Image: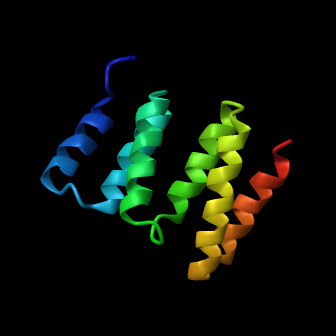
Amino acid sequence: MAEKSPKRIALEASLADDPRDTFLRYGLAMQCLREGDTDEGRERLKALIADHPDDSVPAYQQLGQSFAETDELEHARYWLELGIEKARKIGDSHAAAEMQGLLDTLV
């Protein structure tokens, strides 16, 4: 893996100060994915969902997208379907529609 970016280092430091901050946790997971540290990013998203299953709709979508990008379609479908269910549960029809759109493209 490549050297960590300054942004990732800053996110990790901020998260060390407040490990329960869901915004920082999501941001760090996304930074890991952007930097190609796919496994770490996915694990961070999964941990965020485990801790806040109804408040992490974007994490479901990003997991689904991440798995779709690597042609792991079964995993992509799983996370997208779960995310659609959670989005509908909280009344986020926009997120549900976005995830459904991605799900519909998976063959």
From the top left corner, tell me how far across and down residue 7 is, in percent. 31, 37
Task: Pick the residue in front: 99 or 3.
Answer: 99
Is residue 104 positioned above or below 95 on the image? above
Q: Residue at image x 45%, y 44%?
A: 30
Is residue 6 positioned above or below 84 on the image? above
Q: Residue at image x 83%, y 54%?
A: 104
Task: Pick the residue in front: 2 or 6.
Answer: 2
Q: How is the image coloured?
A: rainbow
From the top left corner, tell me how far across and down residue 51 is, in percent. 36, 62
| Quadrant of the rendered image containing residue 75 | top right
**Does 77 sit left or right of 24 as displayed?**
right
Q: Residue furthest bottom?
A: 91
How many marks on residues?
Answer: 0
**Does 107 sit left or right of 1 as displayed?**
right
**Does 51 sit left or right of 21 as displayed?**
right
Task: Pick the residue in front: 9 or 78.
Answer: 78
From the top left corner, tell me how far across and down residue 88 is, in percent. 65, 77
**Does 64 sit left or right of 44 as displayed?**
right
From the top left corner, tell me how far across and down residue 94 is, in percent. 68, 72
Q: Residue furthest left?
A: 17
> Which part of the image, by quadrant, shows the N terminus?
top left
Q: Residue at image x 61%, y 82%?
A: 91
Is residue 79 positioned above or below 70 on the image? below
| Quadrant of the rendered image containing residue 43 | top left
| Quadrant of the rendered image containing residue 8 | top left
> Which part of the image, by quadrant, shows the C terminus?
top right
